[in-house]
Amino acid sequence: PRQLPAPLTRFVGREPEIAALTAIAHAAADEPATVAVHGPGGRGKSALVIRVAHRLAGEFPDGQLYADLLGGTAGAVPPTAADVLRRFLRALGLPLPAIPDDPAEAAAVYRSALAGRRILVVLDNAVDSRQVQPLLPATPGAAALVTSRRLLATVEARHVALDPLPQDNAIDLLARYSGRPADDIRDGDKESVAAIVQACDHQPLALRVAAARL
């Protein structure tokens, strides 16, 4: 399965975070590796993790599984772990009759299906640890990248708190989404640009919205 969404084309910065997440995921050769990125909505967690997943895809030739767990999506009903297990097992080639109805049994079948495979699992917008735990790989060779708004403290993972964009990166992002040259933004009304970045709290989503109005 190759389920990763397309990465953002106008991605800016985050090189230290990309390097850190990539290094942690490389450990999957010796043990199952899970990286959990948390931070407020709009900070760019999904964009970062999807970008990292695409960079790592070649190291996981047996496939990449992706699920949007809908945490923080207003009005949405988040899928249960059992819902996602069924989707993942179908993607891994199991016929529907072979997938147990019991969630614990389905999780056991899922772990068996991942055993010996180099597979990357991306769990985006997790609600809580209970939703995530049954979906994590348990054998060497597989890795998981998880995003959530809150720290999933009971998930066995390397936890990364995502900070706001640095000032220079925030201005670059504003320029890219405004359609104007970065130098025009940087060399124009610097006080106004700084005020916009500050008003957006250096948050990528807010900066993209603001850029559309420039």
Image (cartoon, rainbow, N blue to C red):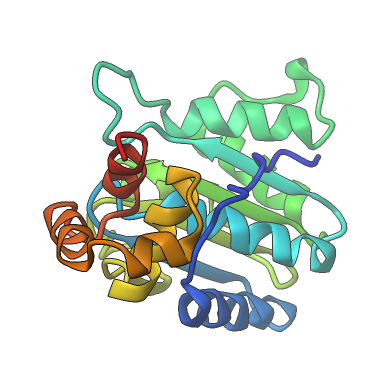
Identity of the residue drawn at 66% across and 51% down: 111
Which is more toward the observer, 79 or 95?
A: 79
Residue 173 visible somewhere in the drawing: yes
Position of residue 156 in the picture relative to residue 32 (left or right)? left
Which is more toward the observer, 178 or 2?
A: 178
Which is more toward the observer, 95 or 79?
A: 79
Query: Percent x, y for residue 206?
Result: 26, 45
For residue 30, which quarter of the picture? bottom right
The quadrant in which the N terminus is found is top right
Position of residue 213 in the picture relative to residue 180 (left or right)? left
Query: Percent x, y for residue 79?
Result: 42, 26
Residue 134 visible somewhere in the drawing: no
Which is more toward the observer, 181 or 176?
A: 181
Q: Is residue 90 above or below residue 31?
A: above
For residue 19, which quarter of the picture? bottom right
The number of callouts visible is 0
Identity of the residue drawn at 75% across and 57% down: 119
Identity of the residue drawn at 42% across and 47% down: 132
Q: In this view, does 81 lie above or below 108?
A: above
